[in-house]
Amino acid sequence: DWVITAQQVGSYKPNPRNFDYAFEKIGLPRARILHVAQSLFHDHVPAKKLGMTTVWINRRHDRPGSGATPPAEAAPDLTFPDMATFANAATSEVG
């Protein structure tokens, strides 16, 4: 497991330096890393630009608007309403 902080990297999302630092640390191809996050603007836009598979935790629950962040054009690969639902799906998929 790895813990990488924005302070450690010296940049803040959506700056791709955070992702680049993580790629170097982890040492796996981007296609093997699953990025799970809530913010379309701060997480999914840069992750998709970098070729990552993404899971959106959509906490908006059909409420209009984009929350506290600017609207973003991002197409997550999968969407779940919360982390528990995602964890259950991942666990049953792995077996």
Image (cartoon, rainbow, N blue to C red):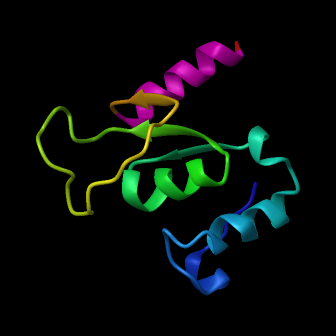
Q: Residue at x 21, y 63 (%)?
A: 68
Quarter occupied by the N terminus? bottom right
Q: Residue at x 84, y 47 (%)?
A: 29
Q: Quadrant location of residue 19?
A: bottom right
Residue sitting at the far right: 27
Q: Quadrant location of residue 24?
A: bottom right
Residue 11 image offset from top left, x and y in percent: 57, 82
Q: Which residue is drawn at 42% across and 29% down?
A: 79
Q: Give the range drawn in magenta.
A: 82-94
Which of these two is toward me, 4 or 29?
29
Q: Main secondary structure of the magenta part?
A: helix
**89 relative position to 62: left or right:** right
Residue sitting at the far left: 64
Residue 75 image offset from top left, x and y in percent: 45, 37
- Up/down of 1 relative to 5, above or below: above
Assess whether residue 13 is covered by the magenta stretch: no
